[in-house]
Amino acid sequence: QVQLVESGGGLVQAGGSLRLSCAASRTASNNAIDWFRQAPGKEREFVATISWNGGYISYADSVKGRFTISRDRAKNTVYLQMNNLKPEDTAVYYCAAERGAVGPNNPSYWGQGTQVTVSS
């Protein structure tokens, strides 16, 4: 069983930065980890993914150049550094674990989410 706990969300002004953390159980050490987000009234959308060893990373076009995903295997933690935030980045952010080593595919495990609100 994989357990994921997100943290780091909050309220920030446009142009500001936040760093989200996803603490994963040790059983997820060989799994790809993804970040998704869901804004009010919208479907959940993919944000970024990182493979089990960090060798493969991919981003949604909407966040390329502003967000950076990274992984600390020693701490079983995945980070999402978000810079130059925009009001349209406002959403609940979820981390998710894939069954395989590389994503994004169809993640099987989800965290509870953390709210990010960007004011204009």
Image (cartoon, grey):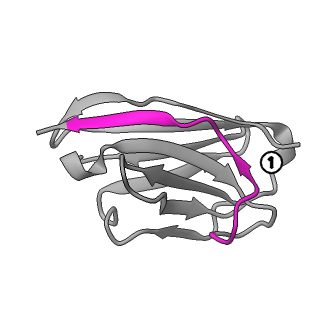
Q: Quadrant of residue 105?
A: bottom right
Q: Quadrant of the C terminus?
A: top left
- Identify the residue position indicated by label 1 in the image: 28
Inspect this view and state whether residue 84 appears: no
**Magenta span has 111?**
yes
What residue sits 65% from the left and 39% below the top? 111
What residue sits 41% from the left and 69% below the top? 60
Q: Position of residue 26 (x, y in %)?
A: 83, 39
What residue sits 28% from the left and 38% below the top? 17
* Nearest to the observer: residue 101 or residue 12: 12
* Nearest to the observer: residue 93 or residue 69: 93
Q: Position of residue 47 (x, y in %)?
A: 46, 60
Q: Examine the rendered structure and indicate whether residue 100 appears above or below residue 11.
A: below
Q: Quadrant of the N terminus?
A: top right
Q: Is residue 117 left or right of residue 20?
A: left
Which amino acid, mark 1?
Ala
What residue sits 60% from the left and 61% below the top? 50
Q: Quadrant of residue 52?
A: bottom right
Q: Is residue 84 left or right of residue 32?
A: left
**Residue found at the far left of this picture:** 120
Q: Position of residue 101 (x, y in %)?
A: 77, 66
**Magenta span has 49?**
no
* Start-end of magenta stretch: 104-118
* Nearest to the observer: residue 68 or residue 96: 96
Q: Within 10 angstroms of label 1, few (less than 14), some, or many (20 or more) residues?
A: many
Inspect this view and state whether residue 17 appears: yes
Q: Examine the rendered structure and indicate whether residue 105 appears above or below residue 119.
A: below
Number of marks in the rendered image:
1
Q: Position of residue 40 (x, y in %)?
A: 36, 46
Q: Examine the rendered structure and indicate whether residue 21 appears above or below residue 30.
A: above
Q: Quadrant of residue 9?
A: top left
Q: Secondary structure at mark 1?
A: helix
